[in-house]
Image (tube, rainbow, N blue to C red):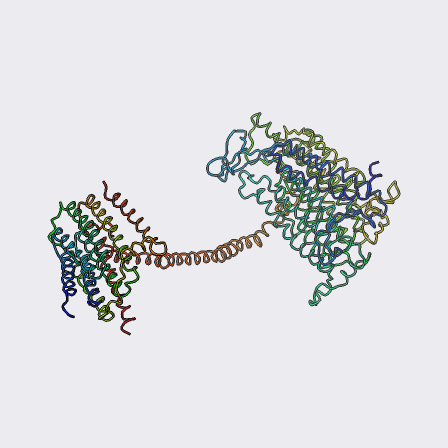
Amino acid sequence: MLFMNMTPDMLRLLVWLIPVPPLVAFFVILLFTRGSKLVSDLVSVLAILLTWVIAILVLIAAILTPHLGEEPITSSIVWLPLGESLATSFRMGVLVDPLGAVMLFFVPLTASMIFIYSTGYMASGAYWTEIKGGEGGHGTTHAAHDEHGGEVIDSAGRRLVKFDASAWKARFMAFIALFAGGMLILSVADNLLMLFIGWEIMGLCSYLLIGFWNNRVYANQPNRITPMIAGIKAFMTTRIGDVFMLIGIAWLYSFTGTLNFRDILYNEEALHALAATPAFPNLAWLGGLTVAGAIGLLLIIGTVGKSAQFPLHTWLPDAMEGPTPVSAMIHAATMVSAGVYLLIRMFPLLSAGWVEGGPLTAPMTAMAWIGSFTALFAATIAMAQRDVKKVLAYSTISQLAFMVAALGIGAYIAAAFHLMTHAIFKALLFLGSGSVIHAIEHGEEHAHHHGHHFPIDFDAQDMFNMGGLGKRIPVTAWTFLIGGLALAGFPFVTAGFWSKDEILADAFAHAPVVFYVLAFTAFLTAFYTMRQIGLTFAGEPRTAAAEEASQRDWRMNTPLVILAFFAITAGWIGIPAALNPLGVNPFHDFVAGTLLEHPEALPFDPLPMIVSVFIALTGLAVGWLVYVARPLKAGQPDPLARALGPIYTLLEHKYYFDEAYDFLFVRLFQWFSDKVVYQLMDRGLIDGFLHFVARMTEWIAFRNKDFDTFIVNGAGDEVAQGVGNLGQAFKYVQSGRVQQYLAVAAAGLLMLAGVFIWAFFLR
Amino acid sequence: MIPLNLYLLVAAALFAMGVYGVLARRNAVAILMSIELMLNAVNLNLVSFWRYRAPDALSGQTFAVFVFAVAAAEAAVGLALIISIYRSRETVVAEDVNMLKW
Amino acid sequence: MQITPVTVTFAIMSIFALGGGLGVVVNRNLVHAALFLVLSLFGIAGLFILLEAPFLAAVQILVYVGAISVLITITIMVTRRIMGIRESVNRQWPVAAVVAVLAFATLGFVIVSQFAGETPVSDVPPESVAQLGAQLVSSQAFLLPFELASVLLLAALIGAIVVARD
């Protein structure tokens, strides 16, 4: 086969090439395709497929390499020459070790599926946009008519027209190509700085993509968060995490002199030094915190921002404003995974000084607490959400928290496993939800043509407007079901089961408190998943839109099927050794090589597995009973609301955290930005200073002008004038009369003669 | 013998008269006549000195001959000019020929 | 100074010269002035003879009296038509008088102080006229000035013609 003949250099070159096609596609689409939707579709999909092929080749080569952990595929170049010799230069390069190989498995897979899906999803759709003043609003020229062919006035008095959602499709494909490029850079990076570069590219793209439909407004809801605001919110919130992360990176570099993963994390002495040195020797109350701990905590804050853990979780649900492929990309396959990937990658640093069975280090404790809390917190909110994507958003936060908690208790491989399976089935679920939304929108259109009128604020994403879609869009329904079961952890046949079970097993063995919290969360997860499936697909359609819903695009259905396949099978690679027909746990053995100490798998304990099976089935059953056995009719309220009463409202409003943050922080900073930075500093001081300088210069210039006019020019003019006057006075000498001249000459001559006589004759 | 200074005085007087005539007379021809007076005074001077100081060297007389030639030339041209001016300006008053005034 | 024929002749010739000169500069009538000029020139010629330069006297009469005075008279005739001048002197005649007097005073002073009572150094050599002629054409003497004077006369001739023609 090809890679039998592949030389190590060729392999390294392939690794370098992995992030390249999507990045090239980004530039090509922006610069050359001139907005052609077909060309940009082709360019971006071909690019990501190329990356996938290369990644598979590298992955196979990596799997076939024995002892990949000790001798990973690496290649680096001198990036920043420092010091006298090249040896001390800062190098950047690529690294494929077992963990990296895992990334190379699911990132290109999910990205490719999402790209193909996007070519279908972004080809249609419409939303409200506001026209201000005259006409055409926001300078757009693609305003399509709504069904009435004109504009409407919503309850807030704004003039709205329908805008074609596919107008900027080429730009969308370019942006997600850039996004994929950023994620791939992060995945193959061999040092923290390059990882951070990929991290920041994704941060930018999250802003660009969440706020992609930047002119969208919601009819009758002037205070609702629009995509533009959501984009800023996402960027700002993750930024907070990024700042701390950068401080951590800088501290790490200054302490160890390198940012290379292998040099720090696979290196006994470096880890030992990091774990032994106190971080703040001068502060007694922080005496126990080592450098490793401090840096670890800073990096964790970065992940808290990027992976939307409590308390920086508020951006992720609002990020659902972006088009659904973006939600899939950002919140399943890539960006939020990057946060957890960072922690998994830096695990040796975070756990420096920890031995199995011993006390947890500070970062691990933090992760365990944050993870457990966030998991439960998010799961409770998910139960009371109406929007199909918001349920998935909170579910993502919750599942990521699972991974963080797993790392917190030292379940390194379980976290990596769950990262992989979660990416696949969450991407599947998001794409499925997008398919559902498109189906409802098409249904709305069809029903409209048959004369049915919808209110202008009809929400196609509200699950209470759906129902009975199982019969209308079967492909979506079955794939969504598979994804949902994977999320819930349906035993044995779904990937999610095996990965979640491993986390629970580890928690059971090491940290019972974490186990109980995560187990309860798993129960809630299963419940709200079935709630979602029930509300969406089961029973009878609750609205005319659901009645006429349809979705037949192959570009959207094919990725769903492919991802569903992997949602089932991907988990089998990590079946614990005791149950595994192969006798070993291949995933565990492969990934364990990433760490120096090559952790052993836990001895198989049937109890946690029985518990997790029980929890999953029970949760699903309760959900079934409430939402599927007696499906909701149109207009019927959520039974959960009756059951929970006021708690339901609290959950529905996400514990009012957004309002709290707005009150505590946002208003304060807005005031500060406006009054202090803008008015006082920028306009008052800086502009004032500049104006002052300008006025001084102007004053000097005018004095110069005066000097020039009156003194310089004046002198010149006076001289000229004086000479002229002198000439005027003397001109009368020139009388024109020769005799006068002669007389003067004679007189002069006589004077000379007199002098001559006096000189020669009289002396 | 007549002392030299008498001849010279005569010449000086003639010269002074010529100066007065040049500067004071209005008619251009009269001015020219005054100039002839001055030239004659000069000639007289030259010949006097020749006779009294260096009669052997004939350069005194020669000089006088040349003065004659120049005087003649100058008189001719001057009169031609006067006639020309008279033709174009209709005047022979020297004062009236003042086009080069300011 | 004794009264000898030479002295008397000198006195008469001087009177002619000076008187004529005075007449030239004072006389209102131009023709009279021209005639007075002739008289003055004759006087000068006489003085030349007294100074034993007969050739020069002859040249004086030929050139000055014969040619130049005639020329002057012709010019007076030609330009006579608009002669209506009342005054013969212009506005600056006091200045001119002063200058003239000063000139005479200066010259007189020098003459009286330097050249008092001088007598001729020696006699005039015989055949001075022939010698004069020889000198004029001798390349060691005054040939070049002679030729140049010829050129000058030619130029004056042409110039006069050009200037005076219509």
| Circle count | 0
Q: Nearer the viewer, residue A417 or B96?
A: B96
- In this orientation, does residue A687 appear? yes
Considering only vertical position in the picture, is A682 above or below A622?
Answer: below
Quadrant in the rendering for residue A631: top right
Residue furthest front in the image: C126
The residue located at (57%, 26%) in the rendering is A449
Using the rendered view, name the quadrant where residue A395 is placed. Answer: top right
Residue B19 percent across, percent down from the top left: 20, 59
Residue A95 is left or right of residue A752, and the answer is: right
Relative to A29, A609 lies left or right: right
Q: Position of residue A679 (x, y in %)?
A: 49, 55
Residue A396 in the image, given as x and y percentages of width and height: 69, 44
Could you tell whether A316 is left or right of A731 in the image?
right
Which part of the image, by quadrant, shows the C terminus of chain A? bottom left
Q: Position of residue C7 (x, y in %)?
A: 16, 65
Task: Please identify the residue farthest to the right as the structure is shown.
Answer: A583
Asked if A740 appears above or below A586 in the picture, the reply is below
Viewer-side residue, A266 vs A280: A266
Foreground of the two, A635 or A484: A484
- The answer to whether residue A463 is seen in the rendering is no
- Where's the N terminus of chain A, which quadrant? top right
The one nearer the camera, C102 or A164, is C102
Residue furthest out toward the top: A450
